[in-house]
Structures are given as C-alpha cells and as structure tokens.
Amino acid sequence: MHVEAQKASAVKLVESMAVSGARNERGEVRIHESLDELSTDLAYHIAELSEASVKERGVFAIALSGGSLVGLMGKLCEPPYNKTVDWAKWYIFWADERVVAKNHADSNYKLAKDGLLSKVPIVPSHVHSINDSVSAEEAADDYEFGIRQLVKTRVVSVSEISDCPKFDLILLGMGPDGHVASLFPTHSVLNERDEWVTFITDSPKPPPERITFTLPVINSASNVAVVVTGESKAEALHLAIDDVGPDGVSLPARMVQPTKGKLVWFLDKPAASKLDCSQFSE
Ligand SMILES: O=C1O[C@H](COP(=O)(O)O)[C@@H](O)[C@H](O)[C@H]1O
C-alpha cells in the first residue's frame, strides 16, 4: 500500500477505536480495549506531535522513560510511521535513567536502543544519553549541562513561565506505587525546584542509582503522555486521576500537572478498572 494510503488507514483505525474522556485539570484519559489498540493510538499520538513540532520549530525534542513504555511504542517502527515520521528531526532524551552501563539490562538507554532507536533512522548525534562512567550526582549535573547547551541552540525550547526547558513531548510510565520517571513517593526529590535534572542513590526499586527530570521540568513540557497498563497499577491510577481529596495529594503521578501543556493518559482496561468513570465528560 502507498504510504499516504497507509497513513489514512491508520487515522481511520485510531478514530474508530479510542475511548476518550476529558477530565478537568487531570488531562485527557484514553482507555483502550487491548494493548494492541493502545500501541496503535500511542504511535498515532506521537507521530502527530512530531509532525506539528517539526512544522513549527523544525525539530522534535522527545524525552523517553524506561519500563513497559518502550515496548508499547513499537508500532512507531512499522508502516506507516517508519516512513512518514521525520526521524532526522528527532532529538532523544530520557526523563529518567538508571546509572548503569549502557549495555546493562537495567539501562533505559539499552531498552530504547533495542526496541526503537536501532529500528528507525534517528541521527546518532541526536541521541542524548547519560554519562554512565561517573557518579549519579555527576551524571545528573552533566545531563542538565547538556540540556542547557541545547536550549541555547533552540533544539529544546524554553518555557515562557518557568526557568525550565520545554520539551515537545515527555513520555512517562507509572509504577504500581505511583512513581513516575524516578520520582518515588515521599522521596525528597519531589521537592526539588531549582535543578532540571537531579539524582537519587536510594531508589526503592532497583537499581538504586538514578537520574531524573524534576517535576518543574516535567510540568513545563508542551505535552506529557503517561502510559499505564495492568491491574497492579489500578489503585495508584485511581489516586492519581480521580477526585480523592488529600489521599492522592503526595502521589508523584498526581503531581504531573503541566502548567500550560497537554496531558494525556494512555490506559488499558485493567489499569483503568478502579477509575470513577462517572466523572468523565466527552
Ligand atoms: O523504574 C522505572 O519504572 C517506571 C515504570 O516502569 P513500568 O515497567 O512499570 O512501566 C518507568 O517509567 C521508569 O522510566 C523506570 O526507570
């Protein structure tokens, strides 16, 4: 099939399947019948944002996470997106990374390299991974310095309202405890307001040493997508999205509240099983 026809059929497919609900300041919630539908919708969403950003700014600065997210991005490597996305304009960052060697099984870079970066024509010099041969603290400082250089050259734009980079898209997963990136519940990094990138050496989920974008950076993005699947995350998701009063206040996933950007939750039915759907509006 011709690329344009493939693109048109991808649009039709997505339009026919996504269940959407708009939800006050918690963003848009998309609940999918299957992981296959979620992956299709996610690929479409990312490709749309890429196209808009390349049109507007000439580049697309996207920050990835690790975990189950990368596998769910797999359809970007397939038709039509492998041909229609302007991969040469992509600049890749990580919202969080484990401070391990790049070939280590725990490396978020390795996960993305194996699952995405090696399958599409992204320019190697546009891939901004961490320096894994220094301490977590130095790796965080070094990563922030690199982003500051790219803000100067407008590869990453800057927020009009905060002293923060404004990524075109930050992709997050969420753990069963409600953590996003490497921002874990009750951890002091949740209070970090000055740094763009910070570090932890006591992650409750192994490996212990990690770097992470801070909340001000996440909340300065033009777009944030949080991808959550599986029943083990249903309770945390309920606390992150529903109107639960003080119970949810300190949950990292609930602190994802882009100031001016758009927030979209990509969910499967098991993850969404405890949501109060009566609060959805079309
Ligand atoms: O440790 C991490 O966990 C979260 C969630 O991972 P998932 O496999 O439960 O989806 C991930 O988003 C983060 O990048 C990673 O470092």
Image (tube, helix red, strand yellow):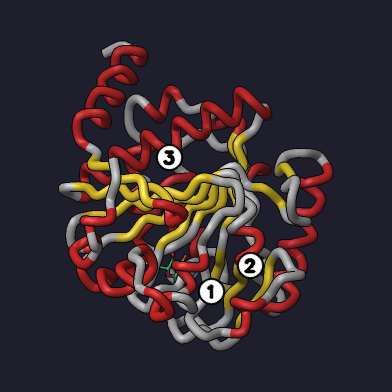
Toward the viewer: 94 or 103?
94
Disc 1 versus disc 2: distance between alpha carbons? Answer: 8 Å
Q: Three-letter amino acid code at disc 1? A: Leu
Q: Which residue is mark 1?
A: 183
Q: Quadrant of residue 89?
A: top right
Disc 3 versus disc 1: distance between alpha carbons? Answer: 29 Å
Q: Which residue is mark 2?
A: 214
Q: Residue at x 60, y 68 (%)?
A: 212
Q: Residue at x 72, y 78 (%)?
A: 137
- The answer to whether the residue labelled 1 contacts the one labelled 2, judged by CB atoms less than 8 Å apart, is yes
Q: Position of residue 149 (x, y in %)?
A: 81, 50
101, above or below 160, in the image: below
Q: Is residue 124 left or right of residue 194?
A: left
Q: Is residue 91 left or right of residue 195?
A: left
Q: Quadrant of residue 75?
A: top left
131, above or below 260, in the image: below
Q: Quadrant location of ligand 1?
A: bottom left
**Disc nearer the start of the sequence (3/1):** 3
The crowding category of the residue bearing disc 1, from other C-alpha atoms within 10 Å (few below 14, some 14 to 19, many at least 20), is many
For the question of whether residue 44 can be seen, the reply is: yes
Q: Three-letter amino acid code at disc 2? A: Thr
